[in-house]
Image (cartoon, rainbow, N blue to C red):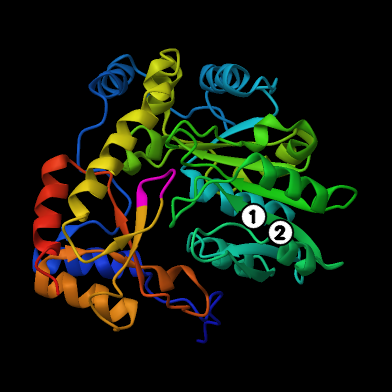
Amino acid sequence: MHLSPKLPKVGTNIFTIMSTLATEVGAINLGQGFPDYPMDERLHKLVAKAMADGFNQYAPMPGLPQLRQAIADKIAFLYGTPVDPINEITITPGGTYAIYTAFTTILEPGDEVIVLEPCYDSYVPNIEINGGIAVLVPLKVPGYGVDWEAVKNAVTEKTKAIIINSPHNPTGAVLGEEDIMALREIVSGTGIYIVSDEVYEHLIFDGIPHQSILKYPDLLERSFVCFSFGKVYNCTGWKQGYAVAPEHLMKEFRKVHQFNCFSCFTPTQVALAEFLQNRSAFLELSSELQAKRDYFIKLMSATRFSLQSSYGSYFICGTYEKISDEADRDFSIRITKEFGVATIPVSAFYQNGKDDKVVRFCFSKKNETLEQAVERLMKIG
């Protein structure tokens, strides 16, 4: 028997490696993006109530109607865009699944997708497993802004899609209105689709408005916009998200979805449908996490790391050039073992392993966790 690997270049990802190492040596895990503090107790109780009330059987394939209506109401409130909850919203088991399904929906062998690097590590495998070709365009360092002229030059007759991500993982950069205008200029009059990863939609700081594709009808008509409840409500283990797309695209998306997942966990859908009625629960998220970012920056000023700017997400990146000239992967492994703090080397977010001596920290942790981690990081160097 012979198995031809679908992803021959892919091994165990860096998140699994670093989290496993952190567990083995008892390190504080500032690598993987998950909170270590409890989710909102109200939401927890709503899920328990939904199970007790008997909502334990299959939900409809596109998702519970009341949840899709609540999402449509939220979109109208935030972005002023009418979205049809019946035909244009599908509940998915997480944001990553939504992105994968979008690529599976649109890609044919040989299609090209423009990917901005560094990027979330699932994008390129998602493209390649569907027979597509990832065309990699580096973000501008430092700051990780988009070089739109380079994006424009990367477009060919084979370009099927561009994937964007804001707030950005791993860097915390965000897209501004000028970025949206540049994107609009590039795709106008073409058949290029947009996959927009907006899983950190509500985790954006310093009063910066989130430039969702949902705000721009001309872009939305060619887009799959992907979200995560797990990221914004501190329940990453729920693996619950959703995708928004115009009806003609969502019809094809659901054809793939129905033979893969078919239906998502019902009790959480019931709970989220009610929880979304409380707008303060998502409107206050940015200030809560910004306070953690600011506290971490203050603590880290006592170390030899130089933190970069972060305007959203769970993450902030930092250089260690004052400490060592090691490769970032070696450095991350060493400080996990020797100092008990796990980070993620940013080279892992590049296909060619580009190493700028930068590591990613997750600051979505309890204050005492951040304090203990920084106390250990102060000893480095």
Residue pushed farthest bottom? 1
Q: Is residue 255 visible?
A: no
- Residue 20 in magenta? no
Q: CA distance from mark 2 to mark 1?
A: 13 Å
Left or right relative to 293: residue 279: right
Confirm whether the magenta stretch covers residue 312: yes
| Corner quadrant of residue 251 | top right
User: Which amino acid type corresponds to the residue marked 2 in the rendered image?
Assistant: Trp
- From the image, give the main secondary structure of the stretch colored magenta: loop
User: Pointer 1: residues within 10 angstroms few (<14), some, or many (20+)?
Assistant: many
Residue pointed to by mark 1:
163
Residue visible at 55% across and 23% down in the picture:
71
Q: Residue at x 14, y 56 (%)?
A: 374
- Residue at left offset 62%, top offset 46%: 196
Read off the magenta span: 310-315
> Is residue 19 shown left or right of residue 75?
left
Residue 11, percent across and down?
41, 77
Which amino acid does the dot numbered 1 rest on? Ile
Check disc 2 and report the residue beneath it: 148
Q: Is residue 275 visible?
A: yes
Helix, strand or loop at mark 1 = strand
